[in-house]
Image: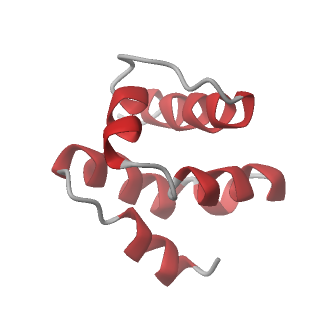
Amino acid sequence: MNKNRLRWACRRGMLELDLILEPFVEDSYELLEEADQLRFEVLLECEDQSLFMWLMKRQAPDNPDMQRIVQIIHESRSQVG
């Protein structure tokens, strides 16, 4: 998926998700291995409520692929600032 489409897909119905997903696309997505890029694209197809729970660390995804990309997003956030 090209970067413009990713930016659009990151615009969610929840500001909290926008503030996590959009910077991830800008700063980290292109550095990912192809398999992780695909995981991220699949992640963007998930419901906002699930994304919120995962990205706010209130719940972990059941799917190991989703666990991996959520962990990568968490790690990218801890490296900022």
Q: Check the image and tell me how it is coloured.
A: secondary structure
Question: Residue at left 28%, top 55%?
Answer: 18
Q: Nearer the viewer, residue 81 or 4?
A: 4
Q: Position of residue 12 (x, y in %)?
A: 28, 60
Residue pictured at 55% horizontal, 34% vertical:
70
Give the percent coordinates (x, y) of residue 41: 61, 60
**Residue 4 horizontal/vertical position (percent):** 48, 83
Q: Residue at x 27, y 50 (%)?
A: 19
- How many numbered discs, if any? 0
Q: Eyeballing the image, is 7 above or below 74?
A: below
Instruction: Identify the image quadrant of the C terminus.
Output: top left
Name the residue furthest left. 15
The one of 75 and 53 positioned closer to us in this rendering: 53
Q: Quadrant of residue 8?
A: bottom left
Q: Residue at x 61, y 35 (%)?
A: 72
Q: Quick check: 4 above or below 39? A: below
Question: Residue 45 or 80: which is nearer the viewer?
Answer: 45
- Image position of 20 with respect to 76: above or below: below
Q: Quadrant of the N terminus?
A: bottom right
Query: Which of the pair 12/24 is nearer the observer?
Result: 12
Snapshot quadrant of residue 34 = bottom right
Position in image of residue 36 (x %, y %): 74, 49
In this image, 41 relative to 74: left or right?
Answer: right
